[in-house]
Amino acid sequence: MALQIAPSILSADFANLERDILTVADADWLHVDVMDGHFVPNTTFGLPVVERIAQVSPLPCDVHLMIDDPDRWATRYAEGGAASVTFHLEAARDPRAIARDLRSLGARASCAIKPGTPVEEVLPLLDTLDMVLVMTVEPGFGGQAFMPDMMPKLRTLRAAAADAGTDLRLQTDGGIARDTVATVVEAGCDVVVAGSSVYGAADRAAEIAELRRLGAEADHHV
Ligand code: DX5
Ligand code: ZN
C-alpha cells in the first residue's frame, strides 16, 4: 500500500491555522491532535475548533483524541466532520462500541496504543477497526525522539491483519522524519504522522514529497 502522509497541525502556528493547513494540501490527511490535559499532560483544542478546521481543510481530517472518556466524545468528532477518528485504547471503556458507532456515522475507526501498552491488547479488536495507531513517542508533545523499539508492534499487527484478511491501515505518530520513515515502512506502517519535520521545513510540500519518496523506496525493499 502506498505510504500516506498526515502532517500534524500541532506544529502549526495556532494564530494562523487556516494558512498553515493550506500549506500541507499535498498530503493525504490532516492530522488533528486533541489533548485534554488529563489523558496527556498538555492541552490543545476541542470540538468547536475541530469543526472549523474540518470546514476549511482541503484534506480529510484524521483526528487523534488524546482525551479521557472517548466513549462519550469520539462520535461527536465524527459528526463534527472528522473523516477518521482515533481514540486511545487506554482511555476507552468499550472500544468495540466506539469503533462500531464511528463506522455507523461513516467515519473510519482507529485505535491508538501508547508505547507502554502491549500490542496484544488491540489484536482482539482488529475486525472493528480501519486503522491502528502505534505511538512512537509518549503522546502529548511534538518534536520528541522516535522510539525504534515499537517496530515489533507493527510487524505483529501487519501479520495479524494478513491472517485475518482485514484491510487495516497502520499508522505511526511521533518522531517521523527523513531519517525514520524507512524504518516504519519496513515494519509495515502505511500512514505516517509528521509534525515538526513537515511544519519545520522551509518547503513543506517538498518535505511531504520527500517523505513519500523515501517511503516508496523502503516499500520496494520489503
Ligand atoms: C504527539 C502527537 C503528534 C505530534 C507529533 O502526542 O500525537 O501527532 O504532533 O509530532 P512530531 O512529528 O514532531 O513528533
Ligand atoms: Zn497525533
Image (cartoon, helix red, strand yellow):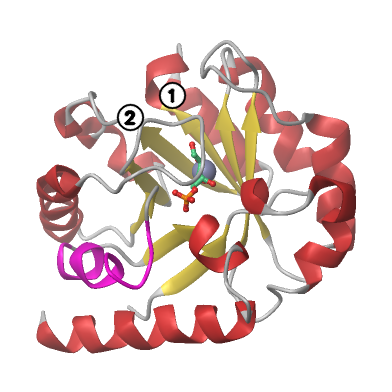
Left or right relative to 208: residue 79? right
Would you identify the image quadrant in which residue 103 lies? top right
Q: Position of residue 149 (x, y in %)?
A: 12, 43
Give the percent coordinates (x, y) of residue 214. 31, 83
Q: Residues within 10 Å of mark 2 (few under 14, many from 20)?
A: some
Quadrant occupied by the N terminus: bottom left
Identity of the residue drawn at 71% across and 54% down: 12
Q: Nearer the viewer, residue 134 or 128?
A: 134
Counting the numbered discs, the total is 2
Q: Is residue 39 magenta?
A: no
Query: Which residue corresponds to the image point at 20% horizontal and 81% vertical from the top-left?
Result: 218
Q: Which residue is mark 2?
A: 114
Q: Quadrant of the C terminus?
A: bottom left
Q: Secondary structure at mark 1?
A: helix
Magenta residues, as a range?
176-187
The type of residue carrying mark 2 is: Lys
- Establish if 62 lies above or below 100: below
Residue 135 can be seen, yes or no:
yes
Quick check: can you spot residue 80? no
Above or below 127: residue 211: below
Q: Residues within 10 Å of mark 1 (few under 14, many from 20)?
A: many
Identify which residue is drawn at 85% across, 43% down. Answer: 51
From the image, state whether disc 2 or disc 1 is nearer to you: 2
Q: Earlier in the sequence, mark 2 or mark 1?
A: 1
| Residue 177 included in the magenta stretch of the image | yes
Question: Which secondary structure, mark 2?
Answer: loop
Nearer-the-camera pick, 121 or 34: 34
Residue occupying image coordinates x 69% and y 63%: 60
Task: Give the residue number, with chain letter if any, for mark 1.
Answer: 95
